[in-house]
Amino acid sequence: MAHVGPRVDYLAGFCCPLGGLAAGKPRVRCHENEIYLSNGSQFVYVYDQEGKLLKAIYKFPDQVWHVELLPVRRQLYILCARNGIYCVSLDQQSRLMKQTEGDGNEGACPSSVFPIDSDACIFPDAMLCAFTLLNDIVVTLSQAQGKWWLKLHELLDPSQESLPCRQISQVGFSTCDQTGDDWDAMPSRFLPVLCCASSPGAAGPGEGLWCSGGFVLEEPLFSLLFGIDAAMLDSPMLLCGFPDGQLCCVPLKALSSSEADDGCSDVAGHDPPVKVLHHLEEPVVFIGALRTEHRAVDDADDQQLFGDVGCDCLVAVGHCGKMVAMKAAQREEAKTPEVREYYLQGPILCAACGGGSRMYYSTHSDISAVDLDWVSNISDPESADNSAYVLPPVLSPASLSICSVVALSLSSRASEGDSELLALSAKGRLMTCDLCSPDEAHPGRLTPEKAGQKIKELLSGIGNVSERVSFLKKAVDQKNRALMTLNQVMNVSASLLSNQDGQKPVTCTVTASWSRLLLRDTLTVSCMLENSSDCSLEPGWTLCVQLFTSSCAFDEDSADSATTYTFPITQLLPGNKREVTLPLGSAEGTKLELPLTISCALYYSLREILDNASDSYESLDDLLPDDSPGLSPDKEGICLPLSECTIDILQCLRLEDSTVPGAAPSIATPSDPLETFLKASSLQSDPSSMEVRDQLLPKALDALGDEYLPPSVASIKVSSELLKNALKNFCEGVPLCCAALQWLLAENAAAAALRSQDVSAVRGLAPDGGEVQLLLREVAVDNLCPAGPIQAVEILIQSPSLADMCRVHQAVIRRIQALVVEQAAQGSGPPDLRVQYLRQIQANHEMLLKDVQSLRDQLCLGDEAGPTAEKLLHVYRQLRNPSLILL
C-alpha cells in the first residue's frame, strides 16, 4: 500500500497516572467541533477543537470505562466502573458554564469541574462492562451468575415518565472465561466490545437509524453472515466481542419482540438468538467494517449510490495481533462468505476503521495502517469482468510514526472534506493526524495548490523521519549494549553455578589479622577476590560482604540484623585479584562478639540494564521466571554466593613475644592493680578530680578481682591415633602436641612462626585484652577400652575470663568436630569401648545438667545469689572437663 504521510498536531495534554495510561479504558469521541475524552480515570473532558480550549470536566464516582454521545437529545452517556451508566445533558453544561462566567471571578479557570451525583445514574448496575446506543434504545452487556447478559432498555421521555428507562428484554450466554459471581475475580484488564451492524434497508427514509459506533454492511455480506431471516426482517445485528475471543451476534428485533418478564433466553435453550461468527482465541479489542471494493465515483449520482451501499468487509482484531476479515466473494455465479485470518505485530492496543479500505491500529511502538483493497490477478483478459474482489493474501502495514497511542477515533471534517484521526497517547496527549484523501492517493489528480502543500508536508516529514531515525538508532545502541552486558552477566553466572562442588572460577578468601591503625591495634578482615575464569567482571558487579554475629546466628531475621558492606567492582580481568579490608574493632574498649560468620557474594542489578535499555519500566517477571538460579528474593538482580567462613577467637589471638620469637605485636602491659587503687584513693580529697577517680576505681577493683579469682580451665582429650591420621601434613618431624597446636592456630596470621619451633603451649591476648593460655600434652586414658589405656592428647584451656575461656573452648570443639566427621567419611572407626563406663559418664552429665537447671531457677527467684552463682560456676567447670575422649 502507499505511504500514508500524516501530519500530526498536538491539541492538549491531560493528566495521567504514573507510568502512563493503560489501553482498554481510555475513549475519544468526536461530534462536530467538540471532542469527548476519558483517560481511564474518573474524569471526562469536553474539548473544543475549533477554539482549542477545554470547555468542561465531569467528575464521576469511579473509573470511567466508556463514553457515548446521543446527538439527537444532546446527551452524554458514561459507563462508570462498579456503578452503572450516567446520563449528562449537554444543555446543562451550557447553563453551568453561564453560571460560572456570571460569578465575576477574574481568576477563575476557563474550564470547570462538575461533580456528577448519583441522581444522574440511569442504569445502576455494578456488573456493567459495555453499552451502545441505537436511537432511543440502550444495549448493555454485563456479567452475572456465571454468564454474560445482553439487555435492551428503552429511553423514555423524562417529562412524561418517572423512570428514565424501561427494560425490554435480555439474553444470556456463556463464554470460556467465566469467573463466577465474584466481581474482584473478574479479569477487568480486557472489556468486551459491543457494536451494531445494520443493512442498507434497516431504516426507512424518514426513520434515520442512528447508532453510536455502528456501521452499515452491504446486502450480500449481511445475508451471508447473519442469515436470510435477519436480512428479511431488516433487523440490526448486535455484535459482541468477548475477552475469551468469541465473536457473537444477536438480532435486535428478535430481542425487542420478546417480553422482559419471561426471563432471559439462554444459549442452551430452543432456537437461541445468539450466533458465534468466529473465535479469535484471544481477547477481542476492536470490531469494524471497511469498503474494500474500488468503484469509480465521477458524478453525484454515483457518489450517492456508493454511500448507500455500505461496507463490504467486516473485521475483528484481537489483542495479540490476530485479525479476521469477512467478505462476500463470487463463486460460480453465487455469493459465498470468505473468511481470512491475518497476523499483525501485537499487542494491539486500539484500532479504528477509515472511510475506505484502510484500518488503523496502534501498538506500543507505532500506529500502522493496513489496506484491504485488493483484486485477484487474472491473466485472461476476457475473464477480467468476471473476476471477484477478494481479500489480499497478506497485509503490508504502513507506519504513521506515532507511538504509545491507547485510544483512536476517526472523524470527518465537513468543511474541508478530509478524514482525521484522533489519538490519545499513553502520556495523556490528545493529537490529530490528517490522513490523505482518496484524491491524494492519485498524483495525477492533484491541483497546484495541493501539490505545493504536499511538497511542504514532505519537506517537513524529512525532518521528522531524521529525528525518528536518530532516536531509533540511539535506542538500538542502548539495547545492544544492554544485551552485551546481560550476556556477560549470564556467562559469569553460568560459570559459577556450574562449579558448585568443585573449584569455583571466582573465589573470595577471608583472613583475619591485627594491624596498626592510628596508633591502635585493630583487628581487620581481608577479603581477597580472585577471578580465575575466562570472563571479565565489568562495572555493575558488586562484592557484598555480610557479617553475622553469634547473637543473630540463630535468628530467623538474621539477614536484617547482619551488617552488610558493598564494594563496587570497576573492572576485574581474568587472572587478577582485588583485596578489600574491613575493620572489626580495636583492642581497647571494644566488645567484639565472636564467633563471627562472614558471607561473601557477587551481586548484579538487572534494574540498571532495563532502565538504560528502555524508557518504559518493563517488569522483570517477563524476563526471568521465579525459579531462575541466582535470582535475588526481590527479583531485582542476580546474587551469586562465593564463600562463607567463621572467624573465631583462635584466629584473633595476639601471641606474646616469649611464645613466638621474631614477632612484635603491640601488647599493652596492664598496670599494677594495687598502685591503681591507691592512686584512685588519693584523689578523694580533690573535688575537681572526682571524674578521674570514678574512671580509675572500677578498673582497679576489676584487676584485683581477676588476680585473686582462680582461672577458668577447660579440658578436651583427643585420640592420638585420630590426630596422627588427620594431621599428616603437620606431623612431619614434629611432635604430635606441636603439630596439633599448629593445626589449631593454622588460620592465625601471627602464628606462622610456630612451624619452625617445637612449641606445645602458647599464651596470648583476646581481642578485648583478656589473657588466654593453650597447653597440649600427651596423656593415657584408663578404664575406657578393654585392650588397655588409650593414648590421647589433652588440650588445656585456661583464662581468668570465663567468657574468653568459653569462646576458645567453642572454637577448639568446632575444629575437632569437623576433623571427626572428615575421618568418619574415610571409613575409620573407633576401638572397642566399655559401654558400662560410657553409660556411667552419661548419667553423671545428666545429673550435672539437672543441677544447672535447678541453680538457674534459684537465681531467677533471687535466693542467695552469691552462693548459688558459685555453685553454678563449679558445675559449669565440671561440664567443661568431661572424662570422655574424642576418637
Image (cartoon, helix red, strand yellow):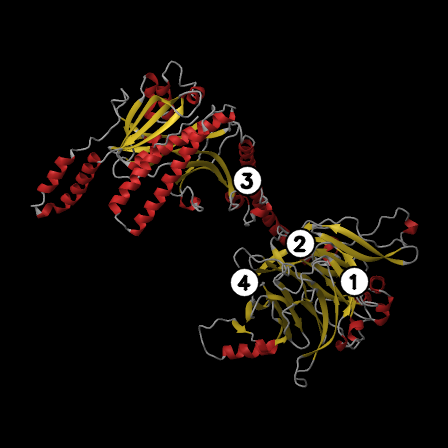
Mark 1 vs mark 3, foreground winner is 3
**What residue would you read off at disc 3?**
482
Q: Secondary structure at mark 1?
A: loop
Seen in the picture, residue 871 relative to 245 is either above or below; the reply is: above
Gap between marks 1 and 3 measured at Cα: 48 Å
Seen in the picture, residue 39 relative to 485 is either above or below; the reply is: below
Disc on the earlier residue, 2 or 3: 2
Q: Which mark is residue 311?
A: 1
Callout 2 touching callout 3 (CB < 8 Å): no
Amino acid at pointer 4? Phe
**What residue would you read off at disc 4?**
14
Mark 1 vs mark 2, foreground winner is 2
Disc on the earlier residue, 2 or 4: 4
Name the spot of residue 863 as percent of width and height, x first. 27, 50
Q: Secondary structure at mark 4?
A: loop
Name the spot of residue 353 as percent of width and height, x first. 71, 60
